[in-house]
Amino acid sequence: NPYLTLRDEYIEAEWWLIKKAEEQGLLDSEYRVVYWCPRCSTTLAEYEVEYRDLEDPSIYVKFPIREEENSHLVIWTTTPWTLPANVFVMAHPDEVYVKVKVGSEYWILAEKRLEHVMREIGVYEYTVVERMKGEDLTRYTYESPLVEVVPLQRKIAHLHRVVPSREYVSMHEGTGLVHSAPGHGFEDYDAALKHGMRDAIVCPVDEEGKFTSDAGLFEGLNVREANKLIIEYLREKGALVYSSSIVHRYPLCWRCKTPVILRATKQWVIKVSKLKDVIREEAEKVNWIPSWALTRLLNIIDNLQDWVISRQRYWGTPLPIWTCPNGHRVVIGSLEELRKYTAIEPRELHRPWIDQVTFKCPVCGLEMNRVPDVADVWMDSGVAFYASLGHPDRNNQGFNPVDFITEGHDQIRGWFFSLLRSGVLGFKTAPYKTVLVHGFMLDEQGREMHKSLGNYVGTDEAIEKIGRDPLRLWLLSNTIWEDIKFSWRELEEAKRDLSILWNIAVFAKTYMDLDSYNPRLDPL
Ligand SMILES: [Zn+2]
Ligand SMILES: [Zn+2]
């Protein structure tokens, strides 16, 4: 049977899993940094962005240090629009930094970047007055140059300090001091969490990519268009060291080609990282063919991230989460359960109908509305092993893992993984017993076959030219889980081998018929 994710029954079965997560205390909503298309007003998955060369500003900015007069941290950025959300500056604790005297000021930056930066900004007269380790810089706090015009900067002024990071500070670009806005960058976000700075996840940008009132002077402006104004303001304040432009690879929305931004948004998350050990144990119980598939999967499990299940889209499986203004929530696991809360019967479970279903909060009595999000499509496919059989509560045969499943090796981190995750979450077990991983059919040079590359050979074409049996023989002589290079020559050889056998059989049969010899009656 095909699995049809758009059927109400399937949607209900998916709701059941989210309810399971809620019952185990694994469902939560929290800030996550996501790719965001300001034009489509939606989050994009990694595979939904494409990269193109784009011109952006490239600026060096001074952040005045509070502890030492006339001294500045010098940072570099290509996204001036993230400066209103700056929270801290990262320095590499093991690298050497220098304090240099430029005119009447002192600047701090990495020794390894000094020459390059000074050459780029055209400063030829400077003296190094002090050398220090990056970790010594962590005693510094600083002022944002935007503090007078960006209210958010006043709110987070107490957080502005130098934070050590070995992972995210490079000596290959910039100044070795990294401007960090955890609301607008994956690495910045990660660093903030590692330093226990949860209140550092700030984002003064709305769904349309415009600054909110938190950004004061820049409120209402599209962030990329605000770049110019921000640079102008920094120049007036005397905080701009140097401004030029750079052409770099930048992510665009796959649908509308608008440059995307990174933005912290509240998302619904299932904390599957807490199930890591069980997922690992269950994976090890499965029969993996070949065995390296398990090794690869265990690597993925070792780096297991919590599962962001919400998407800001219209079409998809609606999340079964209703909330009230007081922050209470109800998670619904089936249509039957929904009927206990409300008399409103949706025409079907998709939007817009499901959004019209409201009911009274069982805790405070205020009206509850569904959160507008839909589910990650990996949840649609990840529940297929049970959802295609109907809702678990109505399926009285109970749940049994499927015996066998096969897909290409690209699905180890894809479908095999997402099925396993759902299996453990819903049933505390792997959803399959044996997994066969097959390879890809490549062209003669080992490239993937694509119609657009012109190297694609269809099975019909191969059968027509060579014949069905030679194709079968050739395919079976390869190892299933290894990629195969398609070869007309090898197919010809398979055909020749089969022809020899065929000719022998024809030869023998001809003479046996002449002698009226019947091998069935007279076995040799
Ligand atoms: Zn878009
Ligand atoms: Zn309530």
Image (cartoon, grey):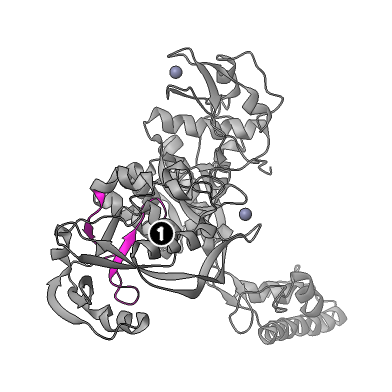
Which residue corresponds to the image point at 30% horizontal and 55% vertical from the top-left?
144
Left or right: where 169 falls relative to 366: left
Q: In the image, residue 13 lies at what x, y percent?
A: 57, 32
Which residue corresponds to the image point at 58% horizontal and 81% vertical from the top-left?
446
The one nearer the camera, 317 or 218, is 218
Which amino acid, by three-letter code, is at mark 1?
Answer: Leu
Q: In the image, residue 167 lies at what x, y percent?
A: 28, 65
Q: Main secondary structure of the magenta part?
A: loop
Task: Judge whether residue 167 is colored magenta.
Answer: yes
- Could you tell me how many numbered marks the image carries? 1
As displayed, is residue 347 above or below residue 308? above
- Which quadrant: the C terminus? bottom right
- Which quadrant: the N terminus? top right
Other residues around mark 1 within 10 Å, as few (<14) / some (14–19) / many (≥20): some
Task: Judge whether residue 237 is colored magenta.
Answer: no
As displayed, is residue 112 above or below residue 27? below
Asked if residue 201 can be seen in this view, the reply is no
The one nearer the camera, 2 or 156, is 156
Q: In the image, residue 145 lies at what x, y percent?
A: 32, 57
Left or right: where 58 falls relative to 392: left
Q: Which residue is mark 1?
A: 294
From this viewpoint, which residue is outermost toward the right?
514
As displayed, is residue 425 above or below residue 211? above
As displayed, is residue 382 above or below residue 132? above
**Which quarter of the figure has residue 176?**
bottom left
Q: Disc 1, ligand 1: is the CB inside 8 Å?
A: no
Left or right: where 5 falls relative to 385: right
Asked if residue 211 can be seen in this view, the reply is yes
Query: Quadrant holding ligand 1?
Result: bottom right
Which range of residues does the magenta coloring cover?
Answer: 159-184
Regarding mark 1 in the picture, which secondary structure is present there? helix
